[in-house]
Amino acid sequence: MAEFLQVLFTGLSQGGIYALIGIGFSLVNMSTRVLNLAQGSYALLGGFVFLTLATRYGLPLWAALALVLVFVAMLGVVTERIVSLRVRPWRPISHDMAILTTLALVVVAEGAAFLIWGPDPQRGPALQRGVVNVLGAILIWQSVWMLVITLVIAAGLQWLLIRTWLGRSMRACAQNPLTAALLGIDVRRVGMAAFTLSAVIGALAGMLVSPITWLDYQIGGEFMLKGVLAYLLGGELAIAGPLVGGLVLGLVENLFLLFPGATGGLLKQVVPMALLIVMLVWRPQGLLGGPRAR
Amino acid sequence: MSAETPSDDAISPACASPAPSPTKGSRASPVAAGAPASPILSIERLSAAYDGSLPVLEDVSLELARGELVAVLGANGAGKSTLLRTLSGLLPCLAGRIIFEGVDITRLAPDRRVVRGLVQVPEGRQMLAALTVEENLLLGGYVHRRDPAGLRRTLDEVFALFPRLSERRTQAAGLLSGGEQQMVALGRAMMGRPRALLLDEPSFGLAPKVVSDTFRVIDGLRSSGLPILLIEQNASKALAVADRAVVLRAGRVVARGTAAELAASEEVRRSYLGD
Ligand SMILES: Nc1ncnc2c1ncn2[C@@H]1O[C@H](COP(=O)(O)OP(=O)(O)OP(=O)(O)O)[C@@H](O)[C@H]1O
Ligand SMILES: [Mg+2]
């Protein structure tokens, strides 16, 4: 029982990180229809800059956090500029070009991280050290916070999308950028807002997870893959989709760790990908998808 | 009517001077082919092109008076939608000026033009398909978002004009019928509180009955004093409601006159009225 609870909780908190990355994908995609593969790289760079500022330069956590957020917000804006530099109202964005560009950015970020921080994994400071005992399961405080922060961010974004003009205009831009412009929406600004927001969320994921799983220069690609999985598994609902997708993914992965020996680790790698193929073929609208209106 | 060749398409000085007189409500009765009294919108020798392409619009001049409905006719690819895109600021002008209510808006960003009251209903209705009817309408009032009470009032007016939309307010706009989508498109434009309306082929792809309904609504809007620039391929319907009309061919104005004059014109009948 305790072991099961342990796996359950570990899965959920890890899934929360996947969910955050997935939500980043979703935000950009729902505003610009671009799949920004560099989503995991914000987690990589944000996480590394954070741990460097906090541990090597001894900045207080809040100051390090503030600097990182400004830094990744700029990365988000730069990504948006690169991807839609040549976009005009009569010349829509090229999605093939965009996806390849962001893939190139993943490689660039990976190389930069290797040059700056070297090959060895590093860990950042935790919000709260130590563990708490719940019904026999040992929970790390950091992962409790991870899950809580994920849920708070998801709730906040859901509110933003449904209740605010920024959210409404993001959805309008995703549906039809030309019409959005005719309604008086500054499509370029909305795209920038979406990229900035998603970069900030990605960096939060990187900072939160680094005390638990450590960071190395290759983790951007891993995050990217997990985030895309969460995003595609969850389906069309902009926030609830990747949230549920990420949590399910985290749970499934960790349940396989109950298998003894190498089998568990192998299954953890393979089964989510197999699950993705099954979903894409038989339920492309995702776990939470409803009827389509296109 | 006056048939024009590109070279003699000179603007009379009367309409080139951007002097708006605030005589609102004085619905200009079908004016003679010459200059309408106080244009709310005047387009002066406009040229436009998509990057690197040959000019799609060349030297187009046109005035829309207060309370007037002017139709722009022309075959596929004549440049009608390009004209509206340029007026809305989605496409930059190569040359020429656009004067709206006495202000030069030639270089204004699209959203600033909407704020000023120049509102377009684009070709093909362009629903925000996954958004609800109400969200579509509300977004029509995006530029007035700092005035929620006013928006609510306008929304109620739109629902009064189109009770059907009120019944379907929570439905995804993409699931509506063509006629209902046309109502959303018109209602969405009304939410912007237009001072002049640009309509791009509102009859396109609609059943004859729905086309008649749509033209009734357009006629009603015009009667309420709203100036309308109407793009149409359905020339007979358009000339039936228009005060004046111009014919575009290959990006140039090739004919202009009162609706009656154009409807009687041999060439227009042959090319656009299908007889
Ligand atoms: N986005 C674009 N990029 C490049 N060229 C374009 C673009 N849109 C239209 N054109 C060209 O501009 C010309 C005029 O097109 P436009 O859409 O203005 O015609 P239209 O009169 O509205 O025709 P229709 O009645 O079919 O709607 C056409 O030759 C078309 O190929
Ligand atoms: Mg057209």
Image (cartoon, coloured by chain):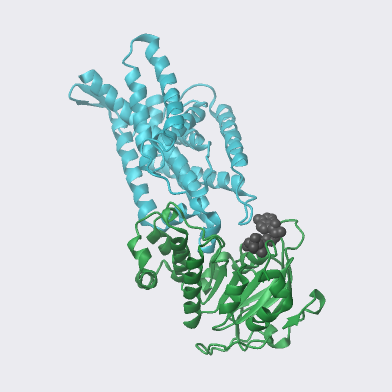
Out of B77 and A146, give the one closest to the viewer: B77
Whether residue B220 is visible here, answered yes or no, is yes
Out of B153 and A293, give the one closest to the viewer: A293
- In the picture, one chain is cyan; tell me its letter: A
- At 65% from the left and 78% from the top, the residue drawn is B245
Where A192 falls versus B87 (above or below)? above
Give percent across and percent down for residue B104.
63, 76
**Quadrant into which the N terminus of chain A falls:** top left
Give percent across and percent down for residue A173.
50, 54
Ligand 2 quadrant assignment: bottom right
Q: On the picture, is B171 further left or further right than A196?
A: left
Q: On the picture, is A206 further left or further right than B55?
A: left
Q: On the picture, is B171 further left or further right than B30?
A: left
Where B231 falls versus A130 (above or below)? below
- At 52% from the left and 74% from the top, the residue drawn is B117
Where A15 falls versus B116 (above or below)? above
**Which residue is the extreme one toward the right?**
B7
Give percent across and percent down for residue B40.
58, 81
**Which residue is the extreme one toward the front?**
B275
Count the numbered circles shown: 0
Out of B157 and B264, give the one closest to the viewer: B264
Whether residue A64 is visible here, answered yes or no, is no
> Which image quarter: residue B8?
bottom right
Chain B drawn colour? green
- At 72% from the left and 56% from the top, the residue drawn is B51
Out of B41 and B32, give the one closest to the viewer: B32
Give percent across and percent down for residue B80.
65, 66
